[in-house]
Amino acid sequence: MHAYLVIALYGAFFAFGLAAYAFSLKRFRRYLHATVDSRLVAPTIVFLHALCVFAMYLGRVVRLNSSDAVLAPGRVASAVFRVPRLTTLAVLTATFVTVGLGTFATLAIAEVAVQARRRNLL
């Protein structure tokens, strides 16, 4: 397989994954607005985003699997306690900002596309 096909394939995987993450956060935000005080919505979304970024770090950098929480809890604990290192915090911060901006951009583009589609239907 040619390298440009592999890059395009991984780009598509990234785009679909980011879109799924963005739309799930949007649905969760809508649910929170319906069930809790509106002052708690933004901090809850940011906290959930931080947890997701931490899970991405554990899965992609430390290479932990979901079954490791049961099968290798010591490895999971040592990975969690490794977080206060400066390089780990830098990776987490960069990922938090990058995925956050990507999520915002995905939702903004989707909203513009939906509004344009609605205008064309009217």
Image (cartoon, helix red, strand yellow):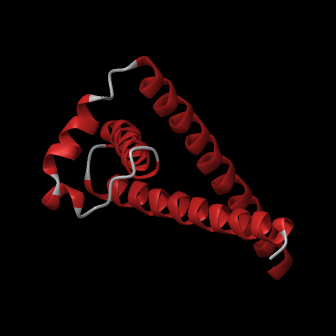
For residue 40, side relative to residue 89 (left or right): left
Out of 22 and 63, give the one closest to the viewer: 63
**Viewport quadrant of the N terminus:** bottom right
In this view of the protein, which residue sits in the foreground, 111 or 3?
3
- Extreme residue toward the bottom, this view: 121
At a point 33% along the width and 53% down the height, the residue shown is 64
Residue shown at the point (23%, 64%) measured from the top left: 67
Location of the C terminus (image quadrant): bottom right
**Quarter residue 37 falls in:** top left
89 relative to 68 in the view: left or right: right
Query: Quarter of the image holding residue 9?
Result: bottom right
| Position in image of residue 46 (x %, y %) | 41, 39
Work out which residue is located at the far front of the displayed protein and give it: 1
Name which residue lies at 49% across and 58% down: 26
Viewer-side residue, 90 vs 26: 90
Count of marks placed on residues: 0
Name the residue rendered at 85%, 72% in the picture.
Answer: 2
| Horizontal side of residue 59 vs 8, given as left or right | left
**As displayed, is residue 49 above or below residue 111?**
above
